[in-house]
Amino acid sequence: MRKEIFFSVVVISLILIAPYPEAYAETKLDFWMARFGAEMGIAESQLALGEMYRKGEVVRFNLELATYWLQKAAEQGIPEAQSSLALMYEKGVGGWRNLGKNPVHAYAYYNLGALNGDGTAAAKRDEIGRKMKPDQIKEAQELTRQMVNQFPGMREVTPE
């Protein structure tokens, strides 16, 4: 029992000290710490793990797992995760959801990223918006509202 408690304290301490999300992964230890934190529901660890899979850092490139973990982080209001998902929708890449190119979803996720403080997300949203029809923009704004209401971690603000 004492060994389990000691191990838990060490692992949690490492997670809290780990340099996430600035440097996602340099070693396998970073990967395992991010994975442990992600499975515990820590949004920053979910972001870090999703980015590791998306970029193929330390682990094999895996868009399916990248999408899964980025979605988990995005639902908790992490703007970098929201913008990463937007990019995946914009470019048409993804995993288990087979995202495909979808400007409505890309606009909505960039909008969420902008609302949550990602400085570049607003410019990307506006860039995509210039290529969209007015009914698509309206649909994207409604999708943003739905996501804000569905996930408690997202900021409750009025989408643009």
Image (cartoon, rainbow, N blue to C red):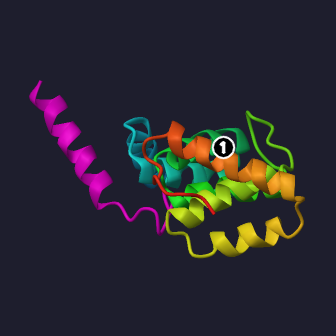
* Quadrant in which the N terminus appears: top left
Count of numbered tags: 1
Label 1 packing within 10 angstroms: few (<14), some (14-19), many (20+): many
Is 154 within the magenta? no
Instruction: Report the magenta residues as a range.
Output: 1-27
Direction left: furthest residue = 2
Q: Is residue 34 positioned above or below 18 on the image?
A: above
Residue 104 percent location from the top left of the image: 79, 51
Examine the rendered structure and indicate whether residue 3 appears above or below residue 9.
above
Helix, strand or loop under label 1? helix
Q: Quadrant of residue 44?
A: bottom left
- Residue 117 position within the rendered picture, expressed as x and y whole percent measured from the top left: 50, 69
Q: Is residue 89 among what the camera can see?
A: no
Mark 1 = which residue? 67
State which quarter of the image contains the C terminus. bottom right
The quarter holding residue 20 reads bottom left
Amino acid type indicated by mark 1: Thr
Q: Tell me the residue at 32%/52% (across/down).
A: 15
Between 148 and 9, the residue placed more toward the observer is: 148
Q: Is residue 47 left or right of residue 1?
A: right
The answer to whether residue 61 is visible is: yes
Say which of 156 and 89 sits in front. 156
Q: Magenta segment: does it hold 3?
A: yes
Identify which residue is drawn at 73% across, 33% down: 96
Tell me if 28 is positioned left or right of 59 in this view. Answer: left
- Across and down, in percent, residue 155 comes to 46, 54
Give the residue displayed 56% in from the left and 61% down from the top: 80
**Which residue sits at x=21%, y=38%?**
7
Q: Nearer the viewer, residue 90 or 28?
A: 90
User: Is 100 on the left-hand or right-hand side of 14?
Assistant: right
